[in-house]
Image (cartoon, coloured by chain):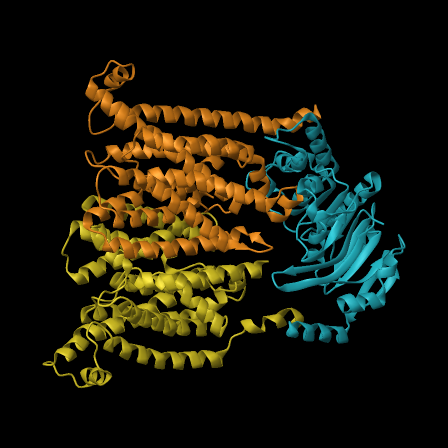
């Protein structure tokens, strides 16, 4: 008995490392945010950054750039990164599938569909409404996937969730493609999909902030249940968990976090897929640590990728979503090859 | 000398070496049982003997030729293997599954000849699944399904039959049913059978030859009464057991009464090192 | 009597398969006739008949023989090619979710097309003819990259790893595609997005002649390999135990799947769902034997695409919807229905 559990030492939770990652990650994040504010088409001295944030003088151009453009952009990146990563961690824990990401719940496809309708039917709709519609679309996608998955005979199994996600996404993507081609709004949509925090304003932040914060807090509160659920449905039920409720709560949190993030900055795939893996690799199997660490690591990746996106080909910006995918793919390939060794 | 033997075989998963310098011979015409603790490498050895896995070094020989250098289709006419927990595609019926066993004997489009059909019928009858023949495999109970898979392996009409834990997940009656079937095939048709089994008493009762494996090495082999000894069980499984003679058949029965602590600790330190 | 009994199940399957294929064939024929009457320029059934026997006006002949017929034939061929490719991939990977997208075929072809469009001026003539070639090259190159990344010495290509690598590489290519599409001018963008959504336009007899040989060679080849596909479906150890050289058979079958899908995508664009749904439909109708599954998939795929293409031309007359979108809109709900039922 104990002989069987011994070789798994490396899977055990490492709270000390986790705390270190949380603290170190936050310090790095502060550094990243500062860097993000100072780097751009106009390079701004770090001292100026400090002054602009804490002793704002509206008549200075540099202070204005920082306050109006750079600061919201940096903050937005951090929030979005955390949102995607935590949503991904919850999805992977709930479905016990290392390939799950928030897109699997139909959030991206739903939001894309709503956006296509918005751009096609009400061009020039004010920003807050676009975000609202996008969020509603995300909810529609998630609701369809979740509903179909649970209505099927035998209830919501991870495989069924994946299949329903694939089918609903295919349908919604096809519908939005149709709308986009018919109304010729495809390129606008592509900009949105490419994902970017470039145009972020304080308005974005104000809309998104409460959702992300609420989602993160809820995720932390649910983290213990997710750990139990990640042992498997029957095991969780045996430990006295009402798995149906936990799964529903998890799905709602994923919708809030990923929906808010997608609605504000478009699709940034791979954060939700990759970061939870990294977090699990570093801190072990306990979601009470995985979730906060994912949040910090997701923010870090997003903020630094955004800096990278501005520095690769100045003064043009590389779409940050594409950049993250390009970083993510090799990592994912590595995972795929490692996966096989464990199966073998 | 048997028709099938392994000579100085190394087996590895990727870089992890499981078995080193293994040499063993399968006695022709007998039932051989591979026994050992979880993770001892017995399934790996079985798969390598049946050429499912390629050894990293050394070779398995069938009728004097290295098995991996022979045409896999020709080998399939000599040797059938039933892996652990095989799965059939949905909707496949029992008789169709058994028909797949004729694959190595077919060419081209592979419609079944009269001879094929006769052999399929025989395999279905001998395994006692005639009444399920048109039922989809996934609808059968565990014991019925296992017999359907054995029927498929039988339809292959081979001298060698390899089975990886053919009795797991079966209740006692079904376990005996499968083992009796294998015994009958061995007695009546002189098939050479090699199987991995967990139940030592089953192994001793039905096999004429036992091979005890620990960490990829053969610790002891021979007739059941040579292998089923207090010392071998202690060494291989880390258990303390009394060995008594079965009052009915006289074959050795093992009655475990405790863990051999020294060997458990040794197993620990080994796994920590790995 | 006993041995007769051994044949009954097989016999029943055969009859069932023959019936299914006859019905699918008849439906394709019916769709064919309806499709000939559908389009921007009105041709009554009577006109069509007259033109077919050579008694139509010059304009009617032009519309029917040079525009409509090649397009209809092509849609059947593309649907058949994609569906058979999907059936092979589902068999080889033992995964019901596998489709030609798994081997990066759509992504690779799409990237090649976008690159081509970005660097070529949009003019009439030569470049448009090069487009299918380009798409085919992109598709096969990507498939080769995925295969070699999934390959490991001593283990070959395990189906699970193939799926994971396929997902990763396709995602990477999609990212690259997004970067490129944003830089396109609006006209080119529209062209590319229609191509990616899948569309059999610009069809002519040259395209038909380019696609036909692939199907004529590869379909019989896959039929010969039907038994091998059955056996591979049982999993690696059993397949080897039954005497299949799994690695060699797998690479041959994958190559056939790439050939079929690559050629189909080259002329039909990124039509995704047919490769997933065609084999599923066929499996429900004729069961798991590839001997029947392969031809039934071909017919189901052909039928789905000819119907979708007809609808694509008809729904929003006079403009058209890319056929791939119609396929997904018909196919996805059906797939969801299957999911809820089983």
Q: Tell me if residue B37 comes above or below residue C198 in the rendering.
A: below
Q: Is residue C267 above or below residue C121?
A: above
Give x and y (percent) for residue C292: 52, 31
Residue beneath the point at 68% across and 63% down: B18
Is residue B39 shown to the viewer in this render? Answer: no
Q: Residue furthest front?
A: C126
Asked if B239 appears above or below B62 in the picture, the reply is below
Query: Would residue B250 be seen by someone viewing this image from the given angle?
Result: yes
Which quadrant would residue A204 be assigned to in this image?
A: bottom left
- Where does the image place residue C119, in percent across and percent down from the top left? 26, 50
Task: Name the spot of residue C321 as percent of width and height, x first.
Answer: 25, 39
Q: Which chain is cyan?
A: B
Which residue sits at x=43%, y=59%? Answer: A100
Quadrant of the image containing the N terminus of chain C: top right
Q: Horizontally, is C134 left or right of B84 in the view?
A: left
Which x, y percent locates residue A55? Answer: 17, 86
For the residue pair C213 and A268, the one nearer the viewer reads as C213
**Chain letter, yellow:** A
Judged left or right of residue C216, residue B272 is: right
Quarter where residue C66 is shown: top left
Q: How many marks?
A: 0
Residue sitting at x 15%, y 60%: A126
Identify the hue of chain C. Answer: orange
Observer-nearest residue: A294 or C210? C210
In this view, the residue in front, C282 or B175, is C282
């Amino acid at each position: 008995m104990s002989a069987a559990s011994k070789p798994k030492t490396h899977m055990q939770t490492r709270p000390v490392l986790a705390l270190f990652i949380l603290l170190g990650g936050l310090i790095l994040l502060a550094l990243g945010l500062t860097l993000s504010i100072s780097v751009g088409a106009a390079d701004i001295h770090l001292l100026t950054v400090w002054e602009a944030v804490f002793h704002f003088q509206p008549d200075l151009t540099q202070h204005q750039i920082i306050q109006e453009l750079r600061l919201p952009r940096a903050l937005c990146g951090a929030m979005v990164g955390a949102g995607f990563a935590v949503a991904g961690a919850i999805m992977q824990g709930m479905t016990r599938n290392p390939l799950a990401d928030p897109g699997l719940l139909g959030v991206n496809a739903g939001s894309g569909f709503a956006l296509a309708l918005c751009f096609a039917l009400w061009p020039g709709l004010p920003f807050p409404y676009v975000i609202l519609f996008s969020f509603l679309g995300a909810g529609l996608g998630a609701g369809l996937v979740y509903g179909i998955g649970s209505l099927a005979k035998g209830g919501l199994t991870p495989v069924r969730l994946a299949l329903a996600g694939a089918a609903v996404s295919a349908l919604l993507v096809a519908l939005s493609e149709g709308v986009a081609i018919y109304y010729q709004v495809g390129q606008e949509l592509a900009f949105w999909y490419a994902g970017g925090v470039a145009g972020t304003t304080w308005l974005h932040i104000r809309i998104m902030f409460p959702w992300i914060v609420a989602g993160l807090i809820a995720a932390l509160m649910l983290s213990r249940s997710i750990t139990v659920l990640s042992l498997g449905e029957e095991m969780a039920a045996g430990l006295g968990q009402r798995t149906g409720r936990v799964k529903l709560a998890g799905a709602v949190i994923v919708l809030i976090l990923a929906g808010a993030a997608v609605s504000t900055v478009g699709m940034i795939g791979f954060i939700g897929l990759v970061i939870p893996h990294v977090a699990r690799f570093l801190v072990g199997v306990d979601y009470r640590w995985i979730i906060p660490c994912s949040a910090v690591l997701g923010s870090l990746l997003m903020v630094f990728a955004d800096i990278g996106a501005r520095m690769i080909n100045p003064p043009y910006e590389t779409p940050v979503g594409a950049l993250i995918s390009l970083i993510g793919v090799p990592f994912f390939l590595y995972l795929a090859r490692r996966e096989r060794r464990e199966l073998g | 000398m048997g028709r099938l033997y392994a000579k100085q075989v190394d087996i590895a998963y990727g870089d992890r070496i499981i078995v080193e310098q293994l040499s063993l011979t399968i006695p022709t015409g007998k039932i051989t049982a591979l026994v050992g603790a979880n993770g001892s490498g017995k399934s790996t050895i079985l798969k390598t003997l049946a050429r499912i896995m390629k050894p990293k070094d050394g070779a398995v020989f069938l009728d004097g030729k290295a098995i991996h250098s022979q045409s896999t289709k020709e080998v399939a006419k000599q040797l059938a293997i039933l892996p652990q927990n095989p799965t059939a595609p949905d909707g496949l019926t029992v008789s169709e599954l058994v028909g797949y066993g004729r694959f190595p004997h077919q060419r081209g489009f592979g419609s079944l000849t009269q001879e094929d059909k006769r052999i399929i019928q025989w395999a279905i009858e001998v395994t006692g699944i005639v009444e399920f023949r048109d039922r989809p495999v996934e609808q059968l109970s565990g014991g019925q399904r296992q017999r359907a898979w054995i029927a498929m392996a039988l339809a292959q009409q081979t001298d060698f039959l390899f089975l990886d834990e053919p009795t797991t997940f079966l209740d006692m009656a079904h376990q005996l049913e499968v083992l009796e079937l294998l015994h009958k095939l061995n007695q009546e048709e002189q098939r050479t059978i090699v199987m991995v089994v967990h139940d030592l008493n089953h192994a001793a009762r039905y096999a004429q030859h036992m091979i005890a494996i620990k960490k990829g090495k053969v610790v002891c082999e021979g007739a059941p009464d040579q292998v089923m000894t207090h010392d071998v069980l202690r060494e291989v499984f880390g258990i303390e057991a009394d060995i008594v003679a079965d009052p009915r058949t006289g074959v050795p029965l093992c009655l475990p009464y405790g863990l051999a602590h020294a060997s458990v600790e040794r197993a620990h330190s080994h796994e920590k090192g790995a | 009597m006993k041995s007769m009994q051994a044949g009954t199940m097989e016999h029943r399957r055969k009859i069932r398969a023959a019936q299914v294929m006859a019905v699918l064939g008849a439906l394709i024929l019916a769709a064919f006739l309806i499709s000939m009457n559908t389009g921007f320029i009105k041709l009554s059934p009577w006109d069509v008949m007259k033109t077919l026997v050579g008694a139509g006006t010059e304009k009617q002949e032009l519309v029917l023989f040079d525009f409509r017929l090649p397009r209809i034939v092509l849609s059947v061929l593309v649907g058949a090619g994609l569906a058979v490719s999907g059936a092979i991939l589902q068999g080889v990977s033992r995964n019901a979710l596998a489709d030609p997208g798994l081997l990066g075929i759509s992504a690779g072809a799409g990237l090649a097309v976008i690159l081509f469009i970005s660097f070529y001026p949009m003019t009439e003539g030569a470049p448009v003819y090069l487009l299918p070639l380009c798409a085919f090259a992109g598709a096969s190159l990507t498939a080769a990259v995925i295969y070699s990344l999934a390959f490991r010495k001593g283990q070959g290509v395990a189906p699970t790893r193939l799926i994971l690598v396929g997902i990763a590489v396709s995602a990477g290519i999609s990212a690259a595609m997004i970067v490129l599409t944003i830089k396109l001018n609006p006209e080119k963008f529209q062209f590319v997005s229609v191509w990616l959504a899948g569309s059999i336009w610009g069809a002519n007899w040259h395209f038909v002649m380019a696609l036909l040989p692939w199907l004529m060679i590869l379909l019989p080849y896959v039929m010969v390999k039907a038994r091998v596909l059955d056996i591979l479906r049982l999993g690696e150890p059993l397949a080897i135990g039954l005497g299949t050289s799994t690695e060699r058979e797998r690479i041959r079958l994958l190559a056939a799947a790439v050939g079929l899908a690559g050629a189909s995508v080259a002329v039909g664009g990124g039509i995704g769902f047919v490769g997933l749904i065609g084999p599923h439909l066929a499996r429900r109708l004729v069961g798991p034997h590839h001997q029947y599954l392969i031809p039934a998939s071909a017919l189901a795929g052909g039928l789905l695409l000819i119907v979708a293409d007809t609808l694509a031309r008809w729904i929003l007359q006079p403009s058209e919807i890319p056929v791939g979108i119609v396929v997904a809109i018909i196919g996805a709900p059906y797939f969801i229905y299957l999911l809820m039922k089983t």
